[in-house]
Each structure stands twice: as C-alpha cells, then as structure tokens.
Amino acid sequence: MLTERQPIQHILSRPISMELNALFEKTNINALLQEQAIAEFSSQHLHTLMWEIAPEGPSPPSKPMQTSAQQQVESGPYPESDYQWLIEVLETLTDIVERNANNNFAALPKADYEQLDAVLKELIYTVGDNEKHPLAPLMDFIGVLISQYEDEHFPKLPDLFPELKEGEEPNDTKNENQQDNSTKESEKPTKALVAEAFFSIGNLLSDGGKTEEAISAYDQVIQLNPEYINAYYNRGRAKGILGQYEDEIADLDEALRLEPNYAEIYLLRGSANVALNHYESAIADIDKSIQLNLDKSIVYLASFLRGCANVMLTHHKSAIADFDETLRLKPDHAQGYFKRGSARIGLTHYKAAIADFDKGLQLEPNDSDAYFLRGYAKHNIEQNKAAIADLDEALRLNSNFFVAHFLRGTIKFLLNQYESAIIDLNNGIHLYPDFAEAYAVRGYAKYVLKQYEMAIADFDETIKLKPDNAETYSLRGYVKYKLHKYNAAITDFDETIKLKPDNAEAYNNRGHLKNKIGRYESAITDCDISLEIDPDHAWAYTNRGYAKIQLGQTESALIDCDKAISLDPTLAEAYHTRGEAQILLGKTQEAETDFQKALELAEQAENQELIDEVKQLLQELENTE
C-alpha cells in the first residue's frame, strides 16, 4: 500500500562545500607562510633581506671606526681557493696566539716563522702599499712577527762583519743599542694590532660567505679586545645569518652596552627580534634607531622592517603607513610594494593589493612570492583564471612553493577541475606532509569523484594533524553517510558537537542519520536543539517532520513541513516529505501537488535520486486513482 511506503531519506542538510568553506575560514594563509618560512612572510627571510640592503656596520661620527668601513670598500668576491687560503691563515694565527697568550711572539718555532714568511710574501704581492686593502692589518701583524723573529734569531750585519764596528765611538755604540732596543719594543705586536688582523680576516670571510669561520675570527678579536664594538656587531650579524638569533641579540646587547647610541645596532637587533617573532621588541628597537639617526638610508630600512613587524602583528594599517614611508624615500623599492600589498591583503583590500604587486613586479619580475600573493588576491575577487596564471608563474620560479600548489589546487577544485586539483594537492602534500588543509581539500575532491574510501583516508589524516577542527569531522561524516556507515557517521557528528556545541548543522545532520537507523525520538531531540540554535533552519523542520511521520505524529509533521517550505520555498525535500504526510492524512490531491513541486525542484537541482523517487510516487498515485 502507498501509505506504508517509506519516504526517501533526505541528504544531509547543506552542500559539503559549506563545511569546506568553514574549514578555509580557519586557514590563515599568512600564518602558513610564516610557519613554513615561505619568503613573503618568513621572519628569517626578512632578517636576511634586511641585511642584503642594510649598512655593513655602525659608524657613528663620535667614534670613527679603525677598520671595516674603509676596508670593505675594496673587499669583493674572490676565488674559493683564496678563501680556503685565508681560513688556513686564520687557523695558523689562532694557534700561534693561543700558544702566546702573554704576547711573547719571539718564542715562535721555526716552522711557524717559515709558514708566516710564506704568508707575508703572498700578502706583500696582494696588498702592496695599499693601506686601505682589507688585508693590510693582517700584513702589518705578520710583518711585525717576522721582523721580531728575525731580530732574535738572525745575526746582524756588524756581527757578520766585525770590521764594520771599527772606528765606532763607545757612546755612539751605546746610543745605537738603545735605539735598537727602543725599535724592538715599538715593533712588538700589540693586542690592538693582533685584534685588527683577526677583524680583517673575519670581514673578508664574512663577505665570502664563510660565516662560521668569520665568527671564529671575531671570537679572537673579542678575546683580545673585549671592547671592540664592531667585532660584537659583526659577530652578531654573522650569527643571525646562521639563524642563531638569540646569540646575535646577546652580541648586539654587548655592543649597545659599550656604545648605546648606534642606530644601526638597534636596527639589526630589531631585525633579529623579528626573526624570533618578538615583534613588539622589534618595533621598540626600530623606533630607537629612527630616533638616533634620521638619515634617509636608515629611515627607509627601519620603516620597511617595522612595517614587516606590523604585518606579523596584524597591525595592517600601521604597516601600510610604514611601507608608504619606505616608498616615499625609495620609490623603486620592489619589496616595499610587495609588503604593502601583503598588508592590504590583511585588510581585504584586494584590488589595491593587486596594484601594489603589479608595480613591484615591474621592478622585480622574478619574485615567486609576489606572484603567489597576487594570485591569492585575485582569487579573493573571483578572478580565478587570472589567479591560476599567477600561481603558474610562482611555481615556475619556485617549484617547491607548497602553499602555491595548495592554493592552485583549491582554485581548480572550485572550478570543478577535480583531477587536476588532486595533482596539485598531491604535490603540496609531498613538499609539506603536515599540511592538514591540503588533505581536507583533496579529500573533498575525492568525495566528488566518488572515491569515498580514499576521501575518508584524507580526512583521517586531516584529523590526525588537527584533531580539534570540528568541520573536518563533519566532512568525514558526510562521506561515511554516502557509504551507508550511519553509526560511524553519527560518531563523527558527535565529535563535531563536542568541539562546537552551537553547531546547528551538526545536530540536524545527526538527527537525519538517526532517522536512517530508526532512532526517531532521538532524531527529534537533535532537530529540536538545532532549531533552538537556528530557528530558521528549514532542513531541521523537514527532518523532524519525517521523524514525526514515523512516530505517527502526522499532523505535527505537516506543520513542520509547512514551516520548512515557508523558510525555503526551493527545498524539494520539504515538499516531498509534506506529500508523504498528505497521503497519510488521505489528502491525495494535495500530495500530488507537493510531489509535482518536489519533482520540479529536484530536476532543477539535478538530484536524480529524488527525481526517481518522486516519479515513482506520482505513478503510484495515478495507479491508485
């Protein structure tokens, strides 16, 4: 009999993509970039970038530097063999200095003398009379060592040729001896001279990218002269290059203890604080650097770095003001445009952000991060094809850009290019296996392709990485529903509700699943709670109406269906369920009208399952008549 027919079980209350959107809302692209050190938001990258364009070292007018500034003018890239030679010299001198802690270099063994003599000949050939050469202090130091050794170990001409002493007056001889002794004292290598030699080695090695060896040289400088400010500065900078930011800050603290008015040191310490995510401290340091030095080169760098710190603090308006200042002082600063664009993304000013990326890319056309962010901005104003073109370029420049793979895959997913989306997401996951959101999107793409078990595996991985994300349990619950694993799906919605107890959808969906296994009273309870949270939830009225039909509460079910239709006149399932109630109440004409409307809406929605069911019901009504 028609009245005994089981109504079709309704699909869950809303498209799965809505749960996915909720998941995306919790996916902070900026945070992902920072976490993975992707260049645009990476603190380490910012620290490195600052010192590709920052001053080499502090040089306050009150205390001119003894080396560095002049020496580094002529330092430049040398062949690798030269740096290896310099490292060997550093090791030799370090050994000599450690064996002569009392500065008694006259006790050098012959082997040291011969080795240093060979070094000196190389230096004389390289440095010559150029006092500004970066290795001039090293040549001076080794020259003194050689001279002192030779005075002590090699006979003088009068000793070799006694006749040269004939005719000398005793007083003259005495005066000459006194002069010789005085000369010997003046030629002894002082700690200052030794420190300068090591400092020059450290600078050259640092310029050549031999950072660890440069630090060893600066260690010797500081041991010889604990008040050598630039040695602390340069050693700190070198430690920052190695990512040893706390040690870098310790060195910069010491430099500031010795001279608290160096703008450049505050600026470098601010950069280190950015790298440590100490953004408030970074901004305080940067403010101090600007206060101490209003020179254009300092202000534009300081404004740039402070803007970066403000981006990380999500102080986007302040960041934009900082980048405005950077670009006022240096209009061709590509990174200034890129960073200002990223700040504008933070304010959802996507069109203005795109304009900034356009300008920056005219100046620097090979920045993969800028293409990525411009693509991200275009995606947010639904220019998805243009966004994919930008992401293509970002990945051409940097094939390991995992977030670009993820975003391109997500956009392709939204464009219904599911297979291609999965390929991108596979690449992103290969590069960063802990990216929970990538598994979630891939899982949904597989769901759409009806690869249900594979979709569940992806959602399992998402939950393993982010077990406190309620939306992922909902997504997995949907897929289990499609596999008719109703109890397992209910368990997932239990977890959703535990994590998000105000989720009306989760209660409604759990109620629907309970209908599927005959737990009608419990289903009504869930629908009641769903409607308490969201009184305009048309699906909850529909599912509750179905449960009431099964419990014989047909009149009340009809009222629920009427309410569902008043809230959503396009909800085919509500007309279908009301038609079932009408049949049970003997209102066949009204039932036929509801079924015809349900069929019309189901065809518009291309819901084939519902189309087939309603057609069968209409046929049975016709046969009954």
Image (spheres, rainbow, N blue to C red):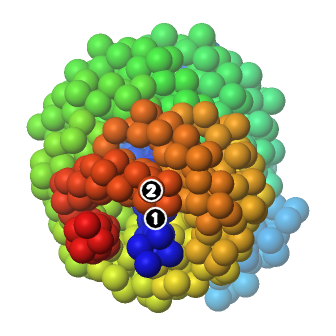
Query: Which residue in the protein does label 2 denote?
Result: 586
Q: Which numbered marker is on residue 10?
A: 1
Q: Residue at x 38, y 15 (%)?
A: 325
Nearer to the camera, 278 or 418: 418
Where residue 54 appears, as percent x and y from the top left, is 43, 36
Q: Which mark, residue 455? A: none
Residue 553 placement: quadrant: bottom right
Note whether residue 181 is visible: no
Q: Is residue 514 left or right of residue 594?
A: right
Q: Position of residue 16 (x, y in %)?
A: 43, 61
Q: Indicate the quadrant where residue 396 lies.
A: bottom left
Marker count (numbered): 2
Q: Residues within 10 Å of mark 1 (few under 14, many from 20)?
A: many
Where in the figure is residue 71, as x and y percent of width and height?
Answer: 43, 44
Q: Label 2 neighbourhood size at 10 Å, few (<14), some (14-19), many (20+)?
A: few
- Compared to 566, does 163 lie above or below? below
Q: Nearer the viewer, residue 482 or 250?
A: 482
Q: CA distance from mark 2 to mark 1?
A: 23 Å
Q: Is label 1 in a helix, a strand or a loop?
A: loop
Furthest toward the right, the residue is 102
Q: Amino acid at mark 2?
A: Gly
Q: Where is 124 relative to 367, above or below?
A: below
Which image quadrant: the N terminus?
Answer: bottom left
